[in-house]
Image (cartoon, grey):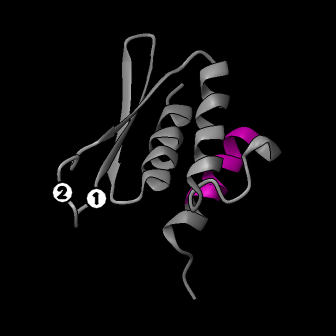
Amino acid sequence: MSESIPEILEKQLKQHLGEAVPTHAANNINAALELSEILEAKGFFFQLKDLCPKSQNETKWRAIFLKDGKKFSADDPQSSVAICTAAVDALANE
């Protein structure tokens, strides 16, 4: 059985941050926001944008991490997945 996207993201995050990764960060917005705080402590600026603010039936989020003029962003219907995807990219290219 193949792993889900959240499982893959959490494994990648653990490769970069070890046990500091909040549990279920890719499935839970509160845990994903804790993850963003961890990256902010490492010097990243974080922003989360609702890309469909007026839609009642569509969701899409953009998570952005900025550091030293470099921008790492990801879009996803799930805010927690967008945050974790952008975080993996940011940490891999730090």
Give the extent of the magenta segment: 9-17
| Residue position for label 1 | 59
The quadrant holding residue 50 is top left
| Residue position for label 2 | 55
Kind of residue indicated by mark 2: Ser
Q: Nearer the viewer, mark 2 or mark 1?
A: 2
Mark 2 crowd level (few <14, some 14–19, many ≥20, 10 Å Cα):
few
Q: Is residue 55 magenta?
A: no
Specify the farthest residue to the left.
Answer: 54
Residue 25, given in percent of the width and then of the height, sits at 63, 53
In the figure, 2 relative to 14: above or below?
below
User: Residues under labels 2 and 1: Cα distance?
Assistant: 7 Å
**Residue at image point 65% right, 49% down:** 31
**Circles 2 and 1 in contact, beta carbons < 8 Å:** yes
Residue 74, given in percent of the width and then of the height, sits at 35, 44
Label 2: which secondary element: loop
Mark 1 crowd level (few <14, some 14–19, many ≥20, 10 Å Cα):
some
Q: Which residue is nearer to you in this view: 72 or 78? A: 78
Q: Is residue 16 magenta?
A: yes
Q: Which residue is nearer to you in this view: 56 or 37? A: 56
**Residue at image point 49% right, 67% down:** 5
**Residue at image point 41% right, 59% down:** 78
Kind of residue indicated by mark 1: Thr
Image quarter of the N terminus:
bottom right
